[in-house]
Image (spheres, grey):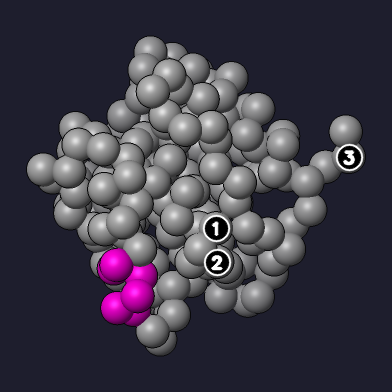
Amino acid sequence: MSAVIFSHGKESGPWGRKITVLAQIAEAAGFDVYSVDYRGLPTVGERVSRLLQQCLSVARVAVLVGSSMGGYVAATAAREVRPAGLFLMAPALGLAGYAPDPEPPACRITVIHAWQDDIIPAAHSLRFARQWGAELHLVNDDHRLESNLPLISLIFRNFLESIRAGGGFNIAPPPP
């Protein structure tokens, strides 16, 4: 069976509200669901290592999902894991103190970001989405994206249906 693996943000936990809601959608779509616990791991490198360990214990990783710092972690690990899809919510891209933005593998990528995000500028996700040909949704919300959880749930359900159907693979970056 294929798995969806969730990566939470710096200040949250493995079963926060967004992950819990999206995990139910993934389970209903027939995916095994895992959420990595990064509490007590302050660095991106430690979190990437933990995610890669989790991925090794799963038969087939279909989708990596990450929020905030977890989005950066998922995008970084994706190069090695090579999932069919990458679903990023307010990913911590382009921030001082982080390595340059990760280069994801050719897979379906969806990014959701908020216009009023005061932690990570939406422009960072716009740049990443443009560079890698990702689907981008900009919503009227803040960094937590909780006001748009019903919309994010619909986008995620459609994303998983596309993965399940085998669509959206090998997305090429748009022309310059």
Q: CA distance from mark 3 to mark 2?
A: 23 Å
Q: Which residue is mark 2?
A: 82
Counting every numbered tag in the picture gives 3
Confirm whether the magenta stretch covers residue 54.
yes
**Vertical placement of residue 78 versus 32, above or below:** above
**Hey, what amino acid is under mark 3?**
Pro
The crowd level at tag 1 (other Cα within 10 Å; few <14, some 14-19, many 20+) is: some
**Hey, what amino acid is under mark 1?**
Arg
Secondary structure at numbered mark 3:
loop
Secondary structure at numbered mark 1:
helix
Tell me where the magenta segment starts and ends, as one range.
Answer: 53-58
Query: Are the residues at dot 1 and dot 2 in contact (C-beta closer than 8 Å)?
Result: yes
What residue is drawn where x is 47% and y is 44%?
Answer: 88
Residue 128 coordinates in the image, percent (x, y):
62, 34
Q: From where the camera sits, is residue 146 visible?
A: yes
Secondary structure at numbered mark 2:
loop
Q: CA distance from mark 1 to mark 2?
A: 6 Å
Q: Which residue is mark 1?
A: 79
What residue is drawn where x is 26% and y is 38%?
Answer: 43
**Hey, what amino acid is under mark 2?**
Arg
Q: Earlier in the sequence, mark 3 or mark 1?
A: 1
Q: Earlier in the sequence, mark 3 or mark 2?
A: 2
Identify the disc placed on residue 175: 3
- Left or right: where 42 falls relative to 49: left
**Vertical placement of residue 155 versus 164, above or below:** above
- Left or right: where 116 falls relative to 13: right
Give the number of the mark in front: 3 or 2: 2
Secondary structure that dominates the magenta span: helix
Where does the C terminus fall, quadrant-wise? top right
